[in-house]
Image (cartoon, coloured by chain):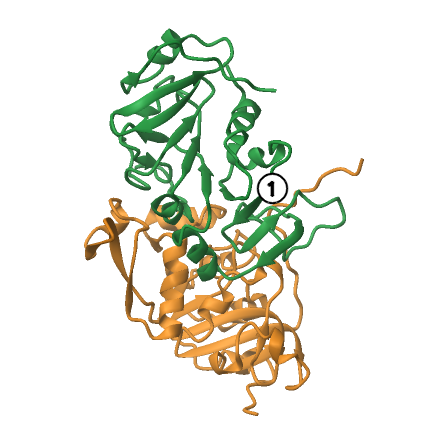
Amino acid sequence: MLDKIGIAKRIAQELKDRYFVNLGIGIPTLVANYIPKGIAVEFQSENGVLGMGPFPFEGEEDADIINAGKQTITTLPGASFFDSALSFGMIRGQHVDLTILGAMEVAENGDIANWKIPGKMVKGMGGAMDLVASAENIIVAMMHVNKAGESKILKKCSLPLTGVGCVKKVVTELAVLEITPKGFKLLERAPGVSVEHIIASTEAELIIEGEIPEMVID
Amino acid sequence: MINKKVNNVQDALQGIENGMTIMLGGFGLCGIPENSIAELVKKETKDLTCISNNAGVDDFGLGLLLHKRQIKKMISSYVGENVEFERQMLSGELEVELIPQGTLAERCRAAQAGIPAFFTPAGYGTEVANGKETREFNGKMHVMEQAFKADFAIVKAWKGDTAGNLIFKGTARNFNPCMSGAAKITVAEVEELVEAGTLDPNQIHIPGIFVQRIFQGEKYEKRIEQRTVRQKK
């Protein structure tokens, strides 16, 4: 079974040379720490920066340079700043190649719910609806089951949707799943996790073809 | 040169009345018009509808106006950092309209650019699209969204000149350029106000035509919401 860092490391393997990538808050943010060697990627943050670097050294924080999580950041050579309309132009215009974000639920038709739980304080969707409606390639980083032990990989989302038919791949602590026209296809299982365990933890039907390889994580 | 300079924040905010709709720039606490917000608190202007990506924190930013119950309605994309906000929202004292962040930015830009409405894929198939016209373009469904209508836009820039030209710094740019010229009157507060002719016209982010009043803010606290650092090796 993977921890959050393991999920981030596995997703980092999906990064390709010359990709522009938008990382959501939480596990997706960790992906930036595990970029495969020998490739160049740039991270976009929707509040208006491309070419985001690591957190600043203590004493070098700049209140005017933050990411979408409102954390102080630095920029790398080649970075640029821009306004919010241009930032979402980049996103809706599909200039950003890959979006990695968290979710509360994902359904077998690619629907995603990640912004609202009825009856609870709603904080808002931020940029998530624009991102999922626009990106050609969306990978969800999430835990397979919720705190009550219920599957978050579903036939149909029960929570209010963030976007419809948009998720392409899901990486959890148990498995890598691809969303195909026929539903979730099990691609890989986490180290030490059996196919039976994954089936038992998943409400949706899984397409399982042949031997399912174990993920290779450094 | 058409002079846009006003002497102080009081003059800059003249004409803001109870019940008006105001756009305010900023992302979190980054690039917010601190001096204008402080003055609105002093003026005790009430029943405001505020269009702003976020709603500040309890004791800073728009949280200061919320605390004094000066805001009737918030139009934002994310409002999570504020206990008083949550209380007013759950008790029904505060009306809240949550809209996707890119749609928020584009509704500002559309108002600035004289585009009454536009189609976006964001929110299609979600409750955000309820009651709105939808249409298919290139095999994909889109939702029609309309330009905002606001009485005042209050933006914050790094540098400005007496002609109203603005230059922003870092990610403090965010919604500020989109809101400039997107309301009947745009007020810009800047950290440094210089004489027209001092700034290089090649470096201007927002031309002065979009700004009616400009002043230099008395002080900037520039509070950091999430101070994150790494250790030196």
Chain the render paints green: A
Q: How many numbered marks have been drawn onto this rendered protein structure?
A: 1
Amino acid at the residue labelled 1: Ala
The residue identified by callout 1 is A40
Element type where label 1 sits in the image: loop
Residue B179, horizontal then vertical, whole percent: 45, 69
Residue B23, horizontal then vertical, whole percent: 43, 67
Residue A15, horizontal then vertical, whole percent: 52, 35
Left or right position of B209 against A155: right
Is the residue A142 above or below the residue B107 in the image?
above
Left or right position of A120 against B31: left
Q: Residue at x 38, y 23 (%)?
A: A177
Left or right position of A131 against B224: left
Residue situated in front as seen by the camera: B162 or B83: B162
Q: Residue at x 61, y 76 (%)?
A: B202
Number of other residues with Cα within 10 Å of mark 1, as a class: few under 14, some 14 to 19, many 20 or more: few
Residue sitting farthest toward the right: B233
Residue situated in front as seen by the camera: B42 or B200: B200
